[in-house]
C-alpha cells in the first residue's frame, strides 16, 4: 500500500528556501573537503583538479582560479540546462570559491595524514555534490557536461567524470609525489563512486 501511495503521490518541487539552504550546505561540505586536500598537498579530478594544478604551479588563490576556469562552461549551461540551473550553479561555484578562502581563518590542522585527508575529503565532497545535484545545481565545468550528457543520452554522470578525473590526476604526475598521486587517484575513485551510486536518472522524484 505504501508503494502505491508513493507512486500516485503528486510531484512536489523544492521551494526556493530549500534550494538556498541546500546550496549553502552542499558548498560548505565541498569546500571543506577541498581545504583538506589542499592542506595535504593532494589533488582531485574535474574542474577542481584543474584549479588545483594551476594553484600549485602558480600559487594563485584556489578560489580565484576555480571561479575563473568555470566561466566558459556557463554558455553551455544556459543553452542546454536553462537559466535556473545556471544561476544555481554560478552561486554554488562562487560560494565554494569563497568558502575555501574562509575555512582556513577558522580551522587549521596541525597534522593531517595525507591518505586519510584525501579519502575523507573526497567522501565529504561527494556528499556535497549529491546535495547540489538533488537541487538541480552543480559546480560547473565537467559537472555541467556530465549532467547534460546524462540527461540527454543516459550516460552515467559518475562514470564519465571518473574517466575524466583519472586523466586529470595522472596529468599531475610532475606536480605531486607518486604516493600522493596514488592517494589522489583513490580519492577521485571514491568521489565518483559516491556520485555513481547516488545520482542516477529516475532515481529521485524531485
Image: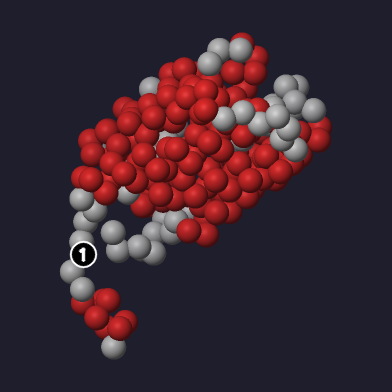
Location of residue 79 in the rendering, given as x and y in whole percent from the top left corner: 27, 34
Looking at the rendered image, the quarter that the N terminus falls into is bottom left
Please give the name of the residue rendered at 42% of the width and 43% of the height, measured from the top-left corner: 26
In the depicted structure, whether residue 28 falls above or below residue 136: above
- Tell me which colouring the rendered structure shows: secondary structure
Displayed quadrant of residue 117: top right
- Residue 35 in sight from this viewpoint: yes
Query: What SS does tag 1 mark?
Result: loop
Which residue is situated farthest in the left direction here?
10
Tell me if 120 is positioned left or right of 1 in this view: right
Count of numbered circles on the image:
1
Tell me if 137 is positioned left or right of 13 in this view: right
Give the crowd class for mark 1: few <14, some 14-19, many >=20 residues within 10 Å. few
The residue beneath circle 1 is 11
Please give the name of the residue rendered at 39% of the width and 64% of the height, measured from the top-left corner: 203
Location of residue 196 in the rendering, given as x and y in whole percent from the top left corner: 52, 55
Location of residue 161 in the rendering, given as x and y in whole percent from the top left corner: 54, 43
Please give the name of the residue rendered at 58% of the width and 48% of the height, measured from the top-left corner: 123
Amino acid at each position: 500500500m505504501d508503494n502505491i501511495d508513493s507512486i500516485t503521490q503528486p510531484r512536489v518541487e523544492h521551494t526556493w528556501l530549500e534550494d538556498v539552504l541546500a546550496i549553502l550546505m552542499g558548498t560548505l561540505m565541498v569546500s571543506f573537503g577541498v581545504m583538506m586536500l589542499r592542506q595535504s598537498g593532494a589533488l582531485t579530478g574535474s574542474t577542481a583538479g584543474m584549479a588545483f594544478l594551476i594553484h600549485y604551479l602558480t600559487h594563485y588563490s584556489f578560489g580565484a582560479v576555480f571561479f575563473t576556469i568555470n566561466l566558459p562552461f556557463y554558455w553551455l549551461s544556459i543553452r542546454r540546462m536553462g537559466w535556473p540551473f545556471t544561476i544555481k550553479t554560478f552561486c554554488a561555484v562562487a560560494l565554494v570559491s569563497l568558502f575555501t578562502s574562509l575555512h582556513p581563518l577558522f580551522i587549521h590542522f596541525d597534522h593531517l595524514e595525507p591518505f586519510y585527508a584525501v579519502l575523507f575529503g573526497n567522501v565529504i565532497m561527494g556528499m556535497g555534490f549529491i546535495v547540489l545535484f538533488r537541487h538541480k545545481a552543480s559546480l560547473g565545468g565537467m559537472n555541467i557536461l556530465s549532467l547534460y550528457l546524462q540527461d540527454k543520452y543516459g550516460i552515467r554522470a559518475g562514470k564519465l567524470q571518473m574517466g575524466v578525473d583519472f586523466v586529470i590526476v595522472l596529468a599531475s604526475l610532475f606536480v605531486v609525489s607518486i604516493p600522493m598521486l596514488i592517494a589522489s587517484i583513490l580519492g577521485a575513485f571514491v568521489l565518483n563512486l559516491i556520485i555513481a551510486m547516488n545520482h542516477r536518472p529516475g532515481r529521485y522524484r524531485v
